[in-house]
Image (cartoon, grey):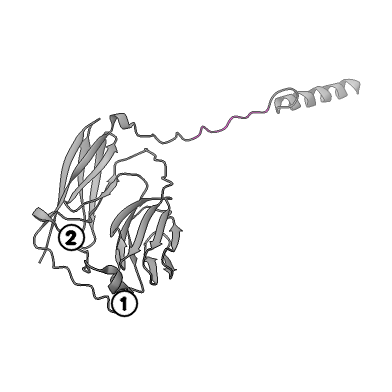
């Protein structure tokens, strides 16, 4: 009987040790964490720059009638025309949003904390076309002594409609999802509109009055670049850049009858 009891005790002791008991430290191993995304080495980065032009005759800008709000008539002073087509010398097309649509792979980018500002001044939105990063603050300012509201109508982000009845009033909003493009409108003044591109990266620009744009400090690689116009839609093309290389590209939007 004593021999049997001893054997039972030995068996229990072996079982405890085998299950990690005694002085054996418990295992702390776990699955390896996913590798962090790469940061761009700007010392080896290149650039893409170019121009956007319009092939054909742009529609004539319409005069905006602001008679419904005497404050707008006073504050606007001049340039009361639609901004759908802003064309300069040689067909240079302004207000085209140009950005890297694809090709950045595993690169990651810090989110800016400095806000992007859209101002309601002269009963127009300034700027008319612009970009922002996911998570970056958008500061909405009313510089006019009249009621405005900014009504964003996105497809993937949350819709919002903010009234600003007081001159100098500011509100802040952030977007959580990339989206090209988010339209803005004012329900008080029907002629007011703007368009916003929401990006996860810094490689976007808006063509200036000469139709020019530039995407700076791109890492070497092959990219799909898209140019978006609010009336003519998007165009894309592929471009490959090497380390410290600058490539020139162009987009031509054709007017159709």
Position of residue 45 measured from the top left corner of the image (x, y, whole percent): 28, 33
**Location of mark 1 (residue):** 70
Check the picture and name the quadrant holding the N terminus. Answer: top right
**Vertical side of 237 occupied by 189: above or below:** below
166 vs 68, left or right, is right
Residue at image x 18%, y 71%? 62
Position of residue 142 measured from the top left corner of the image (x, y, whole percent): 39, 64
**Location of mark 2 (residue):** 86
Residue 48 within the segment the image draws in magenta:
no
Range shown magenta: 26-33
Q: Which mark is residue 4?
A: none
**Vertical side of 185 occupied by 176: above or below:** above
Mark 2 vs 1: CB contact within 8 A:
no
For marks 2 and 1, the one nearer the N-term is 1
Residue at image x 13%, y 68%? 60
Residue 32 within the segment the image draws in magenta:
yes
């Amino acid at each position: 009987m004593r021999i049997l009891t001893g054997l039972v005790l030995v068996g229990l002791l072996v079982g405890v040790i085998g299950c990690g008991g005694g002085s054996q430290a418990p295992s702390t191993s776990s699955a390896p964490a996913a590798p962090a995304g790469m940061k761009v080495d700007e010392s080896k980065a290149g650039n893409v720059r170019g121009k956007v032009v319009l092939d054909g005759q742009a529609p004539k800008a319409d005069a905006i009638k602001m008679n419904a709000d005497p404050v707008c008539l006073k504050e606007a002073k001049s340039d009361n025309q639609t901004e759908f087509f802003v064309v300069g010398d040689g067909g240079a097309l302004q207000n085209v949003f140009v950005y890297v649509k694809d090709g950045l792979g595993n690169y990651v980018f810090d989110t800016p904390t400095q806000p992007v500002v859209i101002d309601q001044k002269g009963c127009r939105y300034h700027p008319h076309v612009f970009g922002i990063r996911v998570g970056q603050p958008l500061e909405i300012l009313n510089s006019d002594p009249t009621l405005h509201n900014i009504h964003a109508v996105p497809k993937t982000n949350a819709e919002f409609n903010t009234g600003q009845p007081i001159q100098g009033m500011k509100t802040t909003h952030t977007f959580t999802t990339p989206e090209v493009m988010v339209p803005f409108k004012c329900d008080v003044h029907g002629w007011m509109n703007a368009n916003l591109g929401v990006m996860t990266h810094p490689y976007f620009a808006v063509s200036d009055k000469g139709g020019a744009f530039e995407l700076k400090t791109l890492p070497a690689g092959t990219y799909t670049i898209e140019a978006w116009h609010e009336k003519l839609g998007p165009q894309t093309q592929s471009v490959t850049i090497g380390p410290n290389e600058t490539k020139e590209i162009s987009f031509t939007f054709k007017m159709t009858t």
